[in-house]
Amino acid sequence: MRPCLLFIVLLHVYNPVPAQNFIAEVMPGNRYLFYQHLSNQKFKENGKAGTVHIANISNWYERNPDKGGMNNEIMNQLYISMQAGPKITFMGGIFYSNTTGIKPALAMQYAHVFKNGLFILTPRVDLKKNGSAELMGMLEFHPQITKHIKIYTRIQLMSNTGPYHHNRSYQRARLGVHLKKFQAGIGINLDEYGSTLKLKVNAGLFFRKVF
């Protein structure tokens, strides 16, 4: 499996077309340091096929569960993408987390851009027996307040369930300012785990850049 994973990573890195979209965010919170990024590349300029890479890392300060801590979380998704229309993209590739390992996956993304905002809805399923299914939704709204400054708001929701019970969910909210391609402000992550929906809350400051 490792040579296969290495091949897919190299396929993503070696790309003659510069990244059309790379977004990175870091949020030092009260319980863990959170990082995420999204990379979207095309194989050919103005083409429909490309790659999508999504990464999330939660680096917990306290890992002892008796003290409310958690193990660090790592999530990576790498897909070959095919745009089927102005709003629909189909994706197939791999999903990895340090709790589930590597799984083949299929996903579909609906993206609607409107004045001062963006709405995305993405269902995803594992391609394996007794795999999980999830639904992610995101709404961004950034109205103009001056010539150069916007308000930046985002709500992002995800829920993942297996054949027998709930696995993982989160709700992430951001409120800040948007200056050119940089956003910063306050953020909160609500994380739910397992069939009992054990809740963990992480609040802090976020810093986000669109490259």
Image (cartoon, helix red, strand yellow):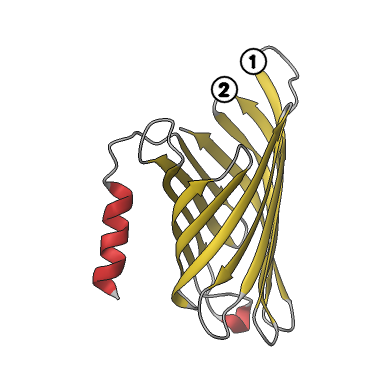
Quadrant in which the C terminus appears: top left
Q: Are marks 1 and 2 in contact (CB under 8 Å)?
A: yes
Label 2 neighbourhood size at 10 Å, few (<14), some (14-19), many (20+)? few
What secondary structure is found at the residue carrying circle 2? loop
Query: Which residue is denoted by mark 1 in the rendering?
Result: 148
Q: Which residue is mark 2?
A: 180
Q: Residues within 10 Å of mark 1 (few under 14, many from 20)?
A: few
Q: Quadrant of residue 182?
A: top right
Closest to the observer: 85 or 164? 85
- State which quarter of the image contains the N terminus: bottom left
| Residue in the picture at 47% in, 50% down | 81
Residue 108 in the image: above or below residue 176: below
The correct choice, above or below, for 87 with respect to 204 in the image is above
Q: Amino acid at mark 2?
A: Lys
Q: Residue 144, relative to residue 68: is it above or below?
A: above
Kind of residue at disc 1: His
Q: Position of residue 111 (x, y in %)?
A: 65, 43
Instruction: Name, please, the residue furthest toward the front.
Output: 84
Q: Is residue 173 visible?
A: no
- Which residue appears at 63% of the width and 72% of the height? 133
| Left or right of residue 149, residue 19 in this image | left
Residue 77 appears in the figure: yes
Secondary structure, mark 1, is: loop
* Residue found 51% across the figure and 56% down from its top: 91
Q: Position of residue 51 (x, y in %)?
A: 41, 49
